């Protein structure tokens, strides 16, 4: 996708085209230090603020001796481009309707427990206060922004590893124990309803062993959320309507139907991890590769390879935590944040065009132009060298360097540069020791594998903001915000095709307009702009008001009924042997088509942006 010119002139974050291309409107590298791990929360714990202006992450800094021992909570402001340190700690979690950020700090509390402090940063007031103690891990904030859900880690070794807890959002709050939910983790509240899910340790030998519990905010009404048979990564949709199950075709259960209940297949694409993408619930996002699904139509597409991998020795089976992309969508579903330990803008990348199996002769790829004449490559988690290259092949391969695991080289696999994945040796020697978990996985400090990059925080634009709508209102012209507009900073107005002013008109503001042909575009806090709205002709001077929400008498869709291809009203359609109802969107056109017989629905087709039926329902 092209993306130049889609950002307001005042945008402070630089969005660029990734080297691999992909289906994005640009990517931005939000942090720039591969020596230290930056992480934007687990895939089901949101790191976008409610208005999409801020993205939070944890930096696993060093104590001067070893990385990972001094975590810090940071915020990136996409409006100003500033990266701000909030404080020492981890587990940053946002409120749902306010720019409140909560996080934890840990202090050793002696035998039996770790004393966890919970801090509350109010960005709007610029204040920071201690909520209370007795919670070492934050899961999230309740749907009504009244409670924090999380856990207290225990360290006496005699009982469960943790207790589930809750804390009211206020100063001097008490950590309340929730019985019956010991040994849990994650504690992810539904964003719209009084239900929380908590993960408990798996038991692979028991197919119906509970792996997720659902419960209400006060710890009551404990139900089964998921069992071993559906072991996978799990999350809520952004509107809280579905409980998503990943590692398969996109699917989920209704939020109020615990296991066992119907499992709904929601889109025709699959993901690994699965996460919400926007508060409307229309979109979800996943990885392997980075993929977005549109639940309105059931369509989906891959938009980017995150290229994030750590090449471990072949005796390490699975330790993906330090490099998982952990993607999350922004409130309007326009952007996706993720982490990767590879430079997506300047890092060399190509794709295998012919499966090579266990070959040591040559590897045929799309192009070798961005790679040196000889060097070291990475495919999957294997490192191997090549002595020379042609324009479309790497020649004379030496496989499984540094005891990395050799897998069959398959058509379509990405190929990256090992040199681009590592910190130069002389620089690495000056750094603190790596995190102890990485050193343990690598088997020591001698292998070049120990110098691999840590993750940075990135974002990708996956769709444009929803367009606003101009109409005549009772007291002048009305500018109605797009369907999703949580991230809207303001609007640029155009008169006869020319911009009126450089500063966007803010929601709630009013401006007087002279006669002319007017249109508008929405501008996000990030500077990302929508496509142009409908046009409206003014014949006299009129005031325009930018509304903060859609009026009650306005709808983005309308019903269109037809019999034998001719428009009719609903009553006539109901009285016909065959009739069609189309749901027509003001900008997107027909988004669904239903067949009726004598007033009874028979089939429904949900259509994608190209008018293709992706999902068909039979009645």
Image (tube, rainbow, N blue to C red):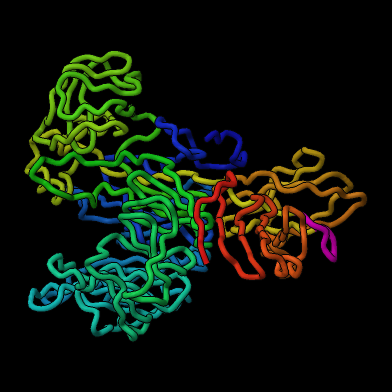
> What secondary structure is the magenta-colored segment mainly?
strand
Comparing 506 with 377, the one in front is: 377
Q: Is residue 58 visible?
A: no
Residue that appears at 19% across and 69% down: 207
320 vs 156: above or below: above
Is 134 colored magenta in this rendering?
A: no
Comparing 55 with 408, the one in front is: 408
Residue that appears at 53% across and 47% down: 80
Is 473 colored magenta in this rendering?
A: yes
Q: Position of residue 193 (x, y in %)?
A: 45, 76
396 vs 119: above or below: above
Q: Is 391 on the left or on the right of 496, as rendered? A: left
Q: Position of residue 279 (x, y in %)?
A: 51, 62
**From which residue to which does the magenta span run?**
470-477
Q: Quadrant of residue 417?
A: top left
Q: Position of residue 546 (x, y in %)?
A: 73, 58
């Amino acid at each position: 996708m092209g993306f130049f010119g889609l950002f307001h002139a005042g945008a402070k974050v630089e969005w660029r085209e990734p080297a691999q291309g992909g289906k994005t409107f640009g990517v931005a590298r939000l942090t720039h230090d591969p020596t230290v791990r930056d992480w934007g929360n687990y895939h089901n714990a949101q790191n976008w603020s409610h208005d999409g202006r801020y993205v939070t992450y944890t930096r696993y800094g060093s104590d001067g001796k070893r990385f990972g021992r001094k975590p810090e909570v940071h915020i990136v402001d996409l409006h100003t481009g500033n990266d701000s340190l909030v404080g020492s700690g981890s587990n940053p979690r946002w409120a749902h309707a306010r720019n409140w950020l909560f996080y934890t700090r840990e202090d050793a509390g002696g035998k039996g427990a770790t004393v966890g402090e919970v801090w509350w940063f109010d960005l709007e007031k610029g204040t920071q206060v201690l909520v209370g103690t007795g919670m070492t891990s934050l899961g999230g904030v309740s749907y009504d922004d009244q409670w924090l859900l999380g856990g207290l880690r225990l360290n006496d070794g005699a009982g469960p590893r943790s207790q589930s807890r809750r804390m009211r959002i206020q100063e001097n709050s008490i950590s309340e124990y929730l019985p019956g939910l010991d040994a849990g983790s994650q504690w992810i509240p539904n964003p719209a309803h009084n239900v929380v899910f908590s993960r408990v340790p798996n038991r692979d030998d028991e197919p119906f062993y509970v792996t997720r519990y659902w419960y209400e905010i006060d710890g009551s009404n404990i139900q089964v959320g998921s069992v071993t048979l559906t072991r996978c990564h799990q999350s809520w949709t952004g509107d809280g309507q579905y409980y998503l199950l990943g590692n398969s075709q996109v699917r989920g259960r209704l939020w109020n139907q615990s296991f066992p209940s119907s499992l709904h297949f929601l889109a025709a694409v699959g993901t690994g991890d699965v996460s919400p993408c926007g508060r409307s619930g229309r979109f979800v996002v996943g990885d392997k590769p980075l993929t977005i699904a549109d639940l309105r139509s059931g369509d989906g597409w891959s938009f980017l390879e995150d290229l994030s991998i750590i090449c471990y020795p072949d005796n390490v089976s699975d330790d993906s935590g330090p490099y998982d992309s952990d993607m999350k969508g922004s409130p309007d579903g326009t952007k996706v944040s993720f982490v990767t330990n590879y430079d997506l803008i300047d890092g060399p990348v190509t794709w295998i065009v012919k499966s090579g199996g266990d070959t040591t002769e040559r590897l045929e790829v799309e192009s070798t132009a961005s790679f040196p004449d000889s060097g070291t490559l990475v495919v999957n988690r294997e490192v191997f060298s090549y002595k020379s290259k042609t324009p479309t092949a790497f020649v004379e391969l030496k496989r499984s360097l540094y005891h990395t695991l050799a897998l069959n080289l398959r058509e379509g696999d990405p190929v990256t540069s090992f040199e681009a994945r590592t910190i130069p040796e002389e620089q690495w020697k000056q750094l603190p020791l790596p995190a102890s978990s990485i050193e343990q996985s690598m088997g020591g400090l001698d292998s070049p594998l120990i110098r691999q990059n840590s993750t940075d925080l990135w974002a990708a634009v996956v769709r444009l903001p929803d367009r606003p709508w101009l109409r005549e209102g009772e007291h002048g012209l009305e500018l109605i915000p797009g369907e999703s507009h949580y991230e809207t900073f303001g609007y640029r107005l155009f008169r006869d095709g020319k911009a009126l002013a450089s500063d966007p008109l803010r929601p709630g503001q009013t401006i007087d307009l002279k006669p002319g042909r007017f249109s508008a575009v929405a501008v996000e806090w990030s500077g990302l702009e929508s496509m142009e709205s409908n046009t409206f002709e003014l014949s006299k001077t009129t005031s325009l008001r930018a509304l903060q929400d859609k009026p009650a008498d306005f709808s983005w869709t309308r019903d269109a009924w037809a019999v034998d291809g001719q428009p009719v009203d609903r009553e006539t359609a109901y009285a016909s042997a065959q009739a069609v109802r189309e749901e027509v969107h003001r900008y997107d056109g027909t988004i669904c088509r239903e067949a009726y017989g004598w007033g009874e629905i028979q089939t429904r087709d949900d259509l994608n942006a190209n008018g293709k039926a992706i999902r068909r329902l039979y009645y």
